[in-house]
Image (tube, helix red, strand yellow):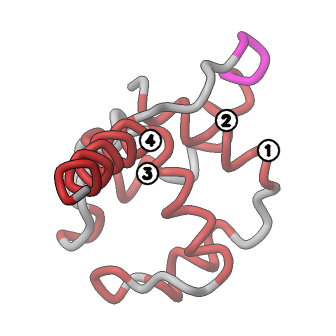
Amino acid sequence: MIKILISFFISLTFISCDVVNQDLPQNNYAQNQRAGEIFERCIACHGQNAEKHALGKSDILASYSSLQIKDALESYRAGTRDKHGMGALMKAQVIDFSGFEIRILSVYISEL
């Protein structure tokens, strides 16, 4: 019985790791065009290819998966994320983004 429980918990660990590493579906051409327009607002701080530490503080977005970017943007928009003390600044940047815009922007950034 103990071996079964241990096997079960180990399998859950692998399943949860796979879910975290999954990406969102790719954008089509029109979605990528729109996401590129949205990303123009981000370039000054995050860099042309999302390669910079914004204001010398943030993580480098180019290292994030699309799902991680989506989760971060949604949390900033909701006001529940304040990583590196950037919560208020980021909330002001993304407050007017729709869920769809966040999704396509997340995919776009992850593919830079």
Give the side of residue 41 with respect to residue 52, left or right: right
Left/right of residue 90 with respect to residue 65 in the rendered view? right
Foreground disc of the pair 3, 1: 3
Left or right placement of residue 45 versus residue 13 in this view: right
Mark 3 nearby-residue class (10 Å; few <14, some 14–19, many ≥20) = some
Specify the label residue 100 is tagged with: 1
- Tell me which residue sits at (19%, 59%) in the image: 2
- The amino acid sitting under disc 4 is Val
Closer-to-camera residue (43/15):
15
Q: Earlier in the sequence, mark 1 or mark 4?
A: 4
Q: Is residue 69 above or below residue 50?
A: below
Q: Which of marks 3 and 2 precedes in the sequence?
A: 3
Q: Which residue is mark 4?
A: 19
Residue at 73% x, 72% y is 95
First in residue order: circle 2 vs circle 4? 4
**Of callouts 4 and 3, the N-terminal one:** 4
Amino acid beneath label 2: Ile
Q: Secondary structure at mark 2?
A: helix
Q: What is the C-alpha distance between the residues marked 2 and 3?
A: 13 Å
- Evaluate if marks 2 and 4 touch, with contact meaning CB atoms under 8 Å apart: no
Was residue 31 drawn as part of the magenta stretch in this picture?
yes
Pointer 3 and pointer 1: residues touching (CB < 8 Å)? no
Q: Residues within 10 Å of mark 2 (few under 14, many from 20)?
A: many
Q: CA distance from mark 3 to mark 1?
A: 15 Å
